[in-house]
Image (cartoon, rainbow, N blue to C red):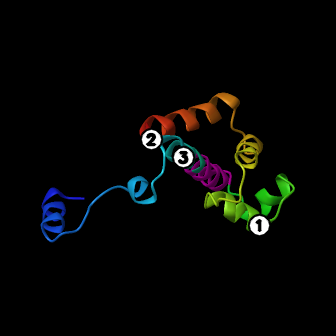
């Protein structure tokens, strides 16, 4: 948010803060969410680079198209296990998965 807008809102009595502050998330919760979001973005990017539909990816991981959509949206019902398994099926190495998690975790810290 631009400083000018922030100052105007605060001057008008509004409290300005982050999503984490609003939801009262701990640093661990923020890191977990950031990891899921990074993994989900990577799945979508890799799927599209391989020119696969959500349905085709679903078949590769023995799941459904709607589940892949939830994975790509980082839905709360999707486990880290499934996100990582999908990345591995899409050709990511363990090192690449670790890199995805580490980069996003660094931003959340």
Numbered circle sitting on residue 29: 3
| Percent position of residue 47, x then y | 67, 53
Q: Is residue 40 left or right of residue 62?
A: left
Residue 100 in magenta stretch? no
Q: Tell me which corner region of the image, top left, top right, bottom left or bottom right, holds residue 5.
A: bottom left
Disc with the residue nearer the chain's start (1 vs 2): 1
Helix, strand or loop at mark 3: helix
Q: Tell me which corner region of the image, top left, top right, bottom left or bottom right, holds residue 96.
A: top right
Classify the position of the N terminus by image quarter.
Answer: bottom left
Closest to the camera, between mark 1 and mark 2, is 2
The residue where tag 2 is placed is 108
Numbered circle sitting on residue 93: none
The residue where tag 1 is placed is 65
Check if mark 1's residue and mark 2's residue have beta carbons within 8 Å.
no
Disc with the residue nearer the chain's start (3 vs 2): 3
- Residue 50 visible to the viewer: yes
What residue sits 80% from the left and 59% below the top? 58
Q: Which residues are magenta?
A: 37-50
| Percent position of residue 82, x then y | 76, 49
User: Marks 3/2: CA distance?
Assistant: 10 Å
What residue sits 77% from the left and 57% below the top? 57
Closest to the camera, between mark 3 and mark 2, is 3
Disc with the residue nearer the chain's start (3 vs 1): 3
| Percent position of residue 48, x then y | 63, 56
Helix, strand or loop at mark 2: helix
Q: Is residue 79 left or right of residue 46?
A: right
Helix, strand or loop at mark 1: helix
Check if mark 3's residue and mark 2's residue have beta carbons within 8 Å.
no
User: Marks 1/2: CA distance?
Assistant: 30 Å
């Amino acid at each position: 948010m631009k400083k000018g807008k922030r100052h105007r809102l605060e001057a008008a009595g509004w409290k300005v803060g982050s999503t984490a502050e609003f939801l009262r998330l701990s640093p661990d919760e923020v890191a977990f969410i950031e990891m899921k979001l990074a993994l989900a973005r990577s799945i979508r990017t890799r799927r599209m680079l391989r020119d696969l539909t959500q349905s085709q990816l679903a078949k590769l991981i023995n799941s459904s198209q709607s589940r892949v959509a939830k994975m790509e949206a980082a839905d709360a019902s999707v486990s880290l296990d499934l996100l990582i398994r999908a990345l591995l099926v899409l050709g990511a190495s363990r090192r690449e998965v670790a890199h995805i998690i580490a980069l996003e975790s660094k931003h959340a810290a």
